[in-house]
């Protein structure tokens, strides 16, 4: 804890003389001991390892098992199709993962290439990688800091630390300060300077106390480098589903053999039948379809300015119920702005205070021209305030030439300039209002100069306090006319108070409406910032995030609680102020420990660890650092908080679409299992061959499944509570619908099979059925299975709304998929070489009538079921408004 020790103690501990610095030999020795001053990353995995890592998934194992089975029965084309699905999944995963992990490289690029150090009694410029603990580092304006330093000297030193703290205003640094509290936040360590922050004003010297991974920036790199491969809710559900389907497939095979033994059937025939059942139980196209739906969702989201880097993140967005957001640059504009002013007058206060603005502009070193600013953000705000009132700095500077100045000093908290006027000279002084009142003897009231009475002083202080309570940064101005050039020491005496302004980093205009929409959707917005508590709460109140200061907590207060205590209290707070990067991660973890799905938005290096640990890390594309973008799951290209709300809406609909797809595919597969299992149990002939089932699973089912994944979605989706991430795919009656649909599809397939046999005078219990009758019956079963599933997909678009309410043609992809599916099915039974491959034949006109009639039954029944479900339309899910 270098910040709690004096300069002498630090120099003694590091065994260095500030006047001469380290010797070249000692620096070499320490470089060997501590290593280069650069951030490290873990060795990258090879593409082959990444590829095989994508195969560690139960559904993939099931698919590989299906491929082996199809190879065993000689169906090489089917095996190739399944393997292609597996390889496609793995390739998509590798591409996404390879793009994502760029955080450490971006951090490494942030370290400055050169540093000024004192060695062997001389000031030398060296590469930042060669800086070692004990080096005396020289600081001046515009220079990045190459290591964590304990300051030894400071003269008006200001350092911009927003990358670490989130504060938009540079921090004053005082080398002589000592902080005894071991839990002093980074933003309050005024005697320290940190790697990769920027000196904006003044000069200083410091001794390097930490380099490379031991710096504050290094700590962030370590957090980013930790493995945090937690599965998303969708991945968990698909993994569970894969296991269940795998066990079902194995169970079915065992069951069939047991039945075969009892029934004394031909074991080889039963082996082929069990393969049929195993194939029927597994939705071979599911992983590929989910990947395609997510990929198309990503494309759709890019059109609303949200770039998703990891496919599963799209779905996770749908269950987000906490949005943790950085303040500076995310909820606010990341630029100071004058929002209030005060002058002592009984007249119209809305008129621009010309003399006050003139003094503030003339007593500033910043510039703002053609939208580009240089200098201290506070001074830039004053220049912009002048521009808004037609008091342009360049014009004022040329009219009232500066001839002398007394620079800003953090002890005085004042800055003064001496400018020429037509009749002589005028001193312009700006700074803290309490300091100005101490050195002033008069004030301007209603345009007249009057003595500064105690009553008038109290009036100024009261008005300044009111602005401070609104979290405004108060800056006053005073002047003094003189007929001669005076020394800087004479400038700040017997001044005349003009008034003061209140500044703040204002909220983004569009954010308030977005927060209201998020709350309507049952999502809780939370602000996390390195800024001061009062400022953070004021912004939070204005945006509707918090109602009172009681809903806020500081980093120091977080440290006083154990992880368990903090997790218990976390849901009571909406604002976390004065926090470090480690605190941000602790906050995210506490929210997650309470079962929340957490999104974190941010743009600074200090946000990167929390972006990585959140369920969804959202970085800003314009103002965001490369580090924050590298650690995130999603990037907002317009830096608009509103976009995340739109992205959540899209994510919710994508999840609903994936769920429709899964339920649809499982209904279809269950129908196949029902048809085959019943035929075995009742000693009937098997109505479908493995190749026919594979065709339906991989071709006929896949097209409507993908089309369901592209459904336009529910317009009321943002009026419902976020989905419980633990909620099953089969919740809210979905499982029952899948079972009913499956039983209906299986039953009508058997009915069609029976009708096909009956045409030739056979029944289901007949023996020695002719090959022609069997082919006809299997063709009817095959076509009914495919057509019923195609029609059934129309009913799957909504669990409660009828087809005509949803609109027949609102999903043109689905209509197209059904037409293409029917055409393909027609082609299979009418094109000779395909009919021969699938052991089917062309149907008569009467048979087509039966096939179409039977195929519509599951659709019609499912529409009737909706009558009973409409009353239960998730009323409990709606958010009260």
Image (cartoon, rainbow, N blue to C red):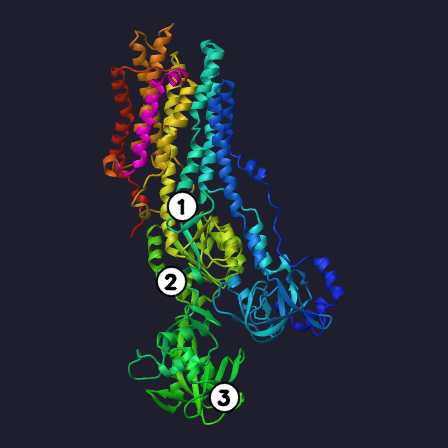
Q: In this view, does 692 lie above or below 200?
A: above
Residue highlighted by disc 2: 508
Along the viewing direction, whichever of 642 and 580 lies nearer the viewer: 642
Along the viewing direction, whichever of 733 and 93 lies nearer the viewer: 93
Mark 1 crowd level (few <14, some 14–19, many ≥20, 10 Å Cα): many
Q: Which residue is drawn at 51% across and 25% down?
A: 65
Q: Which residue is drawn at 32% across and 84% down?
A: 345
How far apart in space, not on screen, are marks 1 and 2 (Cα)?
Answer: 26 Å
Residue highlighted by disc 3: 491
**Do labels 2 and 3 touch, CB within 8 Å?**
no
The region drawn magenta spans 809-836
Q: Is residue 184 above or below residue 343?
A: above
Mark 3 or mark 2, which is nearer the start of the sequence?
A: 3
x and y, in percent, of residue 35 in the image: 69, 57
The mark lying in front, picked from 1 and 2, is 2
Q: What element carries label 2?
A: loop
x and y, in percent, of residue 339 in the image: 37, 72
Q: What element carries label 1?
A: loop
């Amino acid at each position: 804890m270098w910040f709690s020790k004096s300069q002498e103690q630090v120099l003694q501990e590091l065994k260095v003389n500030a006047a001469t610095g380290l010797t070249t030999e000692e620096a070499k020795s320490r470089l060997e001991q501590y290593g280069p001053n650069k951030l490290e990353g873990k060795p990258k995995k090879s593409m082959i390892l990444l590829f095989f890592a994508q195969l560690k998934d139960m559904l993939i194992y099931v698919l590989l098992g299906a491929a082996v089975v199809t190879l065993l029965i000689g169906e090489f084309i089917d095996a190739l199709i399944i393997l292609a699905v597996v390889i496609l999944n793995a390739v998509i995963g590798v591409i996404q993962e390879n793009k994502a992990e760029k955080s450490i490289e971006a951090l490494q690029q942030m370290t400055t290439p050169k540093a000024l150090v004192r060695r062997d009694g001389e000031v030398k410029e060296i590469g930042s990688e060669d800086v070692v603990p004990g080096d005396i580092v020289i600081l001046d304006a515009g220079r990045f800091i190459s290591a964590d330093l304990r300051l030894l000297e400071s003269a008006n030193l200001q350092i911009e630390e927003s990358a670490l703290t989130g504060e938009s205003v540079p921090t004053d640094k005082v080398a002589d300060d000592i902080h005894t509290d071991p839990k002093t936040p980074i933003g309050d360590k005024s005697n320290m300077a940190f790697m990769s922050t920027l000196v904006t004003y003044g000069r200083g010297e410091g001794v390097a106390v930490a380099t490379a991974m031991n710096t504050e920036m290094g700590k962030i790199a370590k957090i980013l480098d930790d493995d945090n491969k937690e599965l998303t809710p969708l991945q968990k559900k698909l993994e569970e589903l894969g296991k269940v389907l795998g066990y079902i497939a194995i169970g079915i095979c065992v069951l069939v053999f047991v039945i075969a033994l009892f029934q004394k059937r031909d074991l080889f025939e039963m082996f082929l039948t069990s393969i049929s059942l195993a194939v029927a139980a597994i939705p071979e196209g599911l992983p590929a379809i989910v990947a395609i739906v997510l990929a198309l969702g990503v494309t759709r989201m890019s059109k609303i300015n949200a770039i998703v880097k990891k496919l599963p993140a799209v779905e996770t967005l749908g269950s987000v119920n906490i949005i943790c957001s950085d303040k500076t640059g995310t909820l606010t504009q990341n630029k100071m702005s004058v929002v209030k002013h005060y002058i002592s007058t009984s007249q119209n206060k809305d008129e621009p205070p010309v003399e006050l603005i003139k003094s503030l502009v003339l007593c500033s070193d910043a510039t703002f021209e053609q939208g580009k600013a240089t200098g201290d953000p506070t001074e830039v705000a004053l220049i912009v305030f002048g521009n808004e009132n037609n008091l342009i700095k360049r014009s004022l500077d040329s009219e009232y030439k500066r001839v002398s100045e007394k620079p800003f000093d953090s002890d005085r908290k004042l800055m003064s300039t001496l400018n020429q006027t037509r009749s002589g000279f005028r001193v312009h002084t700006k700074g803290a209002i309490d300091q100005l009142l101490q050195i002033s003897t008069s004030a301007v009231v209603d345009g007249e100069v009057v003595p500064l009475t105690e009553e008038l002083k109290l009036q100024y202080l009261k008005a300044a306090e009111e602005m401070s309570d609104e979290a405004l940064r108060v800056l006053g101005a005073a002047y003094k006319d003189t007929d001669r050039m005076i020394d800087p020491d004479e400038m700040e005496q017997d001044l005349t108070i003009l008034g003061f302004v209140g500044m703040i980093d204002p909220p983004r205009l569009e954010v308030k409406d977005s927060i209201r929409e998020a709350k309507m959707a049952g999502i809780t917005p939370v602000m996390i910032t390195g800024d001061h508590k009062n400022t953070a709460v004021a912004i939070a109140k204005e945006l509707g995030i918090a109602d009172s200061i009681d809903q806020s907590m500081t980093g120091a207060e977080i440290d006083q609680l154990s992880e368990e205590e903090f997790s218990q209290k976390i849901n009571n707070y909406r604002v976390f102020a004065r926090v470090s990067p480690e605190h941000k991660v602790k906050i995210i973890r506490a929210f997650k420990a309470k079962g929340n799905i957490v999104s974190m938005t941010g743009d600074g290096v200090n946000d990167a660890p929390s972006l990585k640990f959140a369920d969804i890390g959202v970085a800003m594309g314009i103002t965001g650092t490369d580090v924050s973008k590298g650690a995130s799951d999603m990037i907002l290209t317009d830096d608009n908080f509103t976009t995340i709300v739109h992205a959540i809406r899209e994510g919710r609909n994508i999840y609903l679409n994936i769920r429709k797809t899964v339920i649809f595919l499982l209904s279809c597969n269950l129908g196949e299992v029902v048809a085959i299992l019943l035929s075995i149990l009742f000693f009937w002939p098997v109505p479908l061959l493995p190749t026919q089932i594979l065709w339906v699973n991989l071709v006929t089912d896949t097209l409507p499944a993908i089309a369901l994944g592209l459904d336009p979605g529910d317009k009321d989706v943002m009026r419902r509570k976020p989905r419980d991430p633990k909620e099953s795919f089969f919740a809210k009656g979905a499982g029952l619908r899948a079972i009913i649909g499956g039983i209906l599809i299986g039953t009508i397939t058997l009915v069609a099979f029976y009708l096909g046999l009956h045409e030739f005078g056979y029944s289901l219990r007949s023996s020695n059925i002719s090959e022609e009758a069997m082919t006809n019956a299997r063709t009817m079963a095959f076509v009914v299975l495919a057509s019923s599933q195609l029609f059934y997909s129309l009913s799957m678009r909504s669990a409660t709304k009828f087809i005509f309410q949803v609109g027949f043609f609102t999903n043109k992809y689905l209509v197209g998929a059904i037409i293409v599916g029917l055409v393909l099915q027609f082609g299979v039974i009418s094109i000779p070489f395909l009919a021969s491959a699938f052991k089917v034949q062309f149907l008569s006109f009467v048979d087509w009538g039966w096939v179409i009639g039977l195929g519509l039954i599951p659709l019609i029944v499912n529409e009737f079921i909706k009558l009973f479900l409409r009353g239960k339309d998730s009323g409990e899910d709606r958010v009260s408004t």
